[in-house]
Amino acid sequence: MHLEDVAFLAGDAGREAREAARALRDKPLHQRHRALSRTYDSDRARLLLEQDDLERRAGAKVPDPTQWLFEREALEQATPWPVAAERATRWPGDPTATLVDVGSGAGVDALAVAATGRPVIAYERDPVCAALLRANAAALGLAERVDVRAEDAPDVLPAALVFVDPDRRVGGQRHDDATSFAPPPDAWRAWSERAGALVVKVAPATAWPEDAGDTPPFEVVSLAARARERRLLLAGFHDAPPRRALCLPEGTSIEGDGHEELPEVGELEAGVWLLDPDTAVHHADLVSALAARDGLATPCAGRTDYLLGEARVPEAPGTWLRVDAVLPPDAKRINRWFAEAGVGRVDIRKRGVDDRAEAWRKRLRLSGREAGHLVLLRGPTGRPVACVGKL
């Protein structure tokens, strides 16, 4: 995508063209391209089809995707709106103080902040993404609150509240090591020394670099049970616990320091309930904290893949599954149980065992009408077992 493409898509003619592309969604791709090519040249027709595809995908991230423009990589890295909107309400101090957004992309995080009434200075070094952000701000009626600067963030930032979303795809490839991000942890630390509050967003599993000093407090945030981000709280959040798992949209949270004692071993038998903890709890390494809070046990000593209890604890974030039988991980035994129970659809889960869920799906012979579950885990002896039940 080029700057002239953004200018076209954001203008009146572009909005009309995007509406024409939407009207063709039920047609095969070649027919859609042919129809658009009657009005637009071939390159512009391809641009409209690409933007329409991104618009449909964006529906999983923003409330009204018809108001947004994206390019593919910016959409892939964009924060889901509910996560960005929750974060936007958490900044300490004056609610009208300006926030600096470093690495704004197409603008979901910056615009979620602007939607609260707070002014934003957004730094985005990619000129196309900066143009997309300006267009999105205008479409949402937030242009007056967002100052977009198509450049690298300076060493001294112009406001005390700072949000950093570093580029993890430096040099054309994705990096998991934070020291390879742009900007890197050294820049985060330097900004944090002057900031009133500073948050860095990284992937849920990204570890704090060992040579970057003490690990700051952090939160791992999930949305609909899928881990979405890790927030490193480098400055300003003085009352924050060492680590926190936040599960959206419910807003349930688990706090701790990651050094909680492992839960006691419970009796894994028919009639108990298994809890598959929310992914945020796993990524924050707070399963033991959850077990201690809600009085839950573990099926296997020294492991926290799953938790179990005699009854469901509705407040515990995760998925509860009733165990109707505990079987060896033998396909014949498991198929026989599902056949007798009339189960024809199965939710397969596994942690701590080598078996792959897809391999098990191929081994199952299901013909009933009921829904069931198969959980592969390590039992009290440390050996793999299979817990089955109806949903």
Image: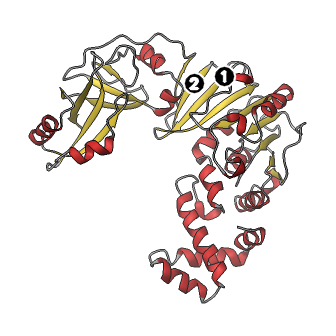
- The spot of residue 364 in percent (x, y) is 20, 45
Reply above or below: 5 against 168: below
- Residue under pointer 2: 244
Reply above or below: 161 against 46: above
Label 1's element? Answer: loop
In the rendered structure, the answer to whether residue 345 lies left or right of residue 9 reads left
Report the quarter where the C terminus lies.
top left
Dot 2 or dot 1, earlier in sequence:
1
Using a 10 Å C-alpha cutoff, classify the residue at mark 2 as few (fewer than 14 neighbours), some (14 to 19) or many (20 or more): many
Kind of residue at disc 1: Pro
- The spot of residue 306 in percent (x, y) is 36, 25
Q: Quadrant of residue 155?
A: top right
Reply above or below: 287 against 367: above
- Number of labelled discs? 2
Label 2's element? Answer: strand
Cα–Cα span, label 2 and label 1: 8 Å
Taking the spot 24% from the left edge, 30% from the top edge, the residue there is: 386
Taking the spot 53% from the left edge, 59% from the top edge, the residue there is: 57
Which is nearer the eye, 24 or 232?
232
Residue 196 in view in this figure:
no
- The spot of residue 366 in percent (x, y) is 17, 48
Q: Residue furthest left?
A: 340
Is the residue under label 1 in contact with that under label 2 (CB below 8 Å)?
yes
Find residue 358 and name its label. none
Using a 10 Å C-alpha cutoff, classify the residue at mark 1 as few (fewer than 14 neighbours), some (14 to 19) or many (20 or more): some
- Residue under pointer 1: 217
Report the quarter where the N terminus lies.
bottom right
Kind of residue at disc 2: Arg
Which is nearer the eye, 121 or 191?
191
